[in-house]
Image (cartoon, rainbow, N blue to C red):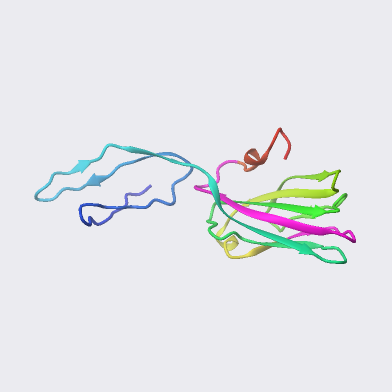
């Protein structure tokens, strides 16, 4: 990361770093010196940056003839590079195929036999165009079909791991 500058106010200088990649970083402060004080550099501070959920949006759609799509808005607080993770659930969804907009990657889909619900999970790395838009997920219809979904922005740095690792449970997506 490039050096950041700040102005001393009341003996304190504050800098906010919001673009560090996930991992541990050594942060130091350097004073360039002047006619009264010598140049100095602080001892390093180790700062850990981890992933976290920045925001989420949910939506439910119900139609008497069966829903064919579900739109989810991009979560507020999402940033470029965040992992956008969408989970779409279709009630009475046995045999239903859920499709994502272009650019999304399917992580898995499963039908629950007890409720005949179909759930599909997708992800994509957020671009600047994704931050103020909504995404429409489509699916085949059934006469009593209802759908719901959630779209979560997971971030805290550059997404450098496959989000499937964070979502898998007992080896099943």
| Quadrant holding the C terminus | top right
Q: Does the magenta stretch include residue 152?
A: yes
Q: Where is residue 156 in the image (x, y as percent from the top left)?
A: 50, 48
Q: In which quarter of the image is residue 64?
A: bottom right
Q: What stretch is highlighted in magenta?
A: 137-161
- Pick whichever, 72 or 41, lies toward us: 72
Q: Residue 131 location, x and y as percent? A: 57, 61
Q: State the residue lying farthest toward the right.
A: 143
* In-image side of 135 versus 157 (left or right): right
Q: Which residue ends up furthest to the left in the rendered image?
A: 36
Foreground residue among 67 and 131? 67
The number of discs equals 0
Position in image of residue 39 (x %, y %)? 17, 44
Q: Which residue is drawn at 24% across and 52% down?
A: 12
Q: In this view, does 85 lie to the left or right of 54?
A: right
Which one is nearer the viewer's eye here, 90 or 99? 90
Location of residue 30 in the rendering, given as x and y in whole percent from the top left corner: 24, 45
Q: Does the magenta stretch include residue 14?
A: no
Q: Residue at x 62, y 40 (%)?
A: 166
User: Farthest residue in the top direction?
Assistant: 170
Q: What residue is at 55 percent from the left and 57 percent from the top?
A: 78
Residue at 43% x, 52% y is 18
């Amino acid at each position: 990361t490039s050096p950041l500058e700040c102005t001393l106010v009341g003996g304190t200088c504050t800098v906010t770093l919001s673009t560090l990649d996930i991992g541990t970083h050594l942060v130091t402060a350097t004073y360039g010196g002047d006619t009264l004080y010598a140049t100095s550099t602080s001892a390093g501070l180790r700062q850990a940056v981890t992933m976290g959920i920045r925001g989420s949006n949910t939506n439910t759609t119900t139609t008497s003839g069966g829903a064919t799509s579900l739109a989810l808005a991009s979560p507020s607080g999402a940033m470029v590079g965040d992992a956008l993770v969408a989970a779409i659930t279709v009630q009475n969804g046995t045999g239903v195929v859920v499709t994502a907009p272009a650019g999304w990657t399917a992580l898995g889909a499963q039908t629950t036999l007890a409720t005949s619900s179909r759930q599909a999970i997708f992800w994509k790395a957020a671009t600047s165009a994704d931050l103020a838009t909504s995404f429409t997920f489509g699916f085949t219809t059934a006469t009593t079909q209802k759908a719901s979904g959630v779209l979560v922005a997971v971030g805290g740095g550059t997404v450098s791991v496959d989000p499937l690792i964070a979502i898998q449970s007992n080896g099943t997506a």
